[in-house]
Image (cartoon, rainbow, N blue to C red):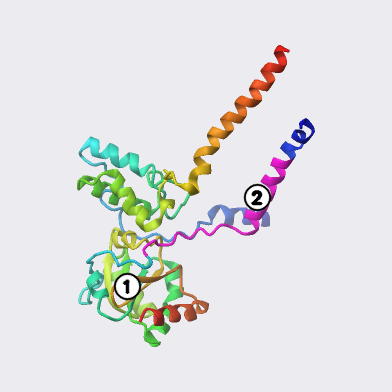
Amino acid sequence: MKRFALALTMVLAVPAFADSDLPAARWANQQLPDARQEAQAKALMEELRCLVCQGQSIADSDAELAGDMRALVRQRIAAGERPEQVRSWLVERYGNWVSYRPPVEPVTWPLWLAPILLLLAGAWLLRKRLVRRRG
Amino acid sequence: MSRLLRFLPLLVLATFVVAVAWRLSRPADEEIRSQLIGQPVPAFALAPALPGRPSLASSDLTSGQPRMINVFASWCVPCIAEAPLLMELKRQGVAIDAVAVRDRPEDVAAFLSRHGDPFDRIGADPESKVQLALGSSGVPESFIVDGRGIIRYQHMGPIEPDDLPVIMREWEAAK
């Protein structure tokens, strides 16, 4: 019984999320009327990282701040900004961390080079195997 | 060569285990700091968060004297813990303005009457626009802005008693 009660408290426990009572911003969950702009905004949202739930993009996140970031992206794109301008506005404030598309710079060279090196290593191993078989 | 190569998988595994153990023993810093430290406050002008109280605009932050901007919300639980420390900072002479994120006037008024009101100006930021413009990633956060409107310091999370010496030092440095 005690164990059941304990399990019940765990089921009923809710995380202490701090959320406001305010409804989502207008453009947080509403598509832009211009389909081309909406497609641009959506593509950018999938490459921007949510500041609260840090593993998710703002397109995927239910956090309020992610909603406000989606609204910001849509409003700026509707106002005629290019997606890269919106991205760099956010990078200026939060660093490259906020973007899921890492720039090519010395600190990220290993990131871009690793797949090439691994492919080369794989090809080398495969070649050794094939040559041995033939012999 | 092949004898050495035989130990390569073990070496890779050992490296992996060491890397994981190291990261577990000292977790990564998950705070995303604003990149605007040392840069001017972005231009903004907010509506008042409370009727009859002065609102906050970036032009209020170039008065020649440093100011602290507290980003808070009535629905934010850690902000309650921080409230007495903001009162203490005000008592020590820190001039504090506030940005109320995603909030209603009646809720802000109730929060301030319950937990103390150290603020000179309070701006309403219903869509977190100013919060995002400042490079802030949550509530509560506090920024110290010098008299020329340059952001000098960012404190993330609730201010705790241990943080007061650092904040007072940054405040004096911003003068």
Q: Which residue is mark 1?
A: B98
Instruction: Looking at the picture, tell me which residue is in the foreground, A42 or A16.
Output: A42
Instruction: Name the residue rendered at 39%, 61% in the picture.
Output: B35
Q: Find numbered disc 1 in the image and state the secondary structure of the residue it sits on.
A: strand
Q: CA distance from mark 2 to mark 1?
A: 42 Å
The tag earlier along the polypeptide, 2 or 1, is 2
Residue B6 image point, x, y percent: 77, 33
Q: Which residues are magenta?
A: B11-36
Instruction: Name the residue rendered at 27%, 67% in the picture.
Output: B124
Residue A7 image point, x, y percent: 62, 53
Q: Residue furthest top?
A: A134
Please indicate whether residue B68 sits to the left or right of residue A133 in the image.
left
Q: Is residue B146 visible?
A: yes
Instruction: Looking at the picture, tell me which residue is in the foreground, B77 or B23.
Output: B23
- Given the image, on which type of amino acid does mark 2 rest? Ala
Rendered image: mark on residue A16? none
Quarter where residue A95 is shown: bottom left
Quarter where residue B128 is shown: bottom left
Q: Which residue is mark 2?
A: B19
Residue A78 image point, x, y percent: 21, 45
Using the image, determine if residue B127 lies above or below residue A61: below
Please indicate whether residue B119 sits to the left or right of residue B11 in the image.
left
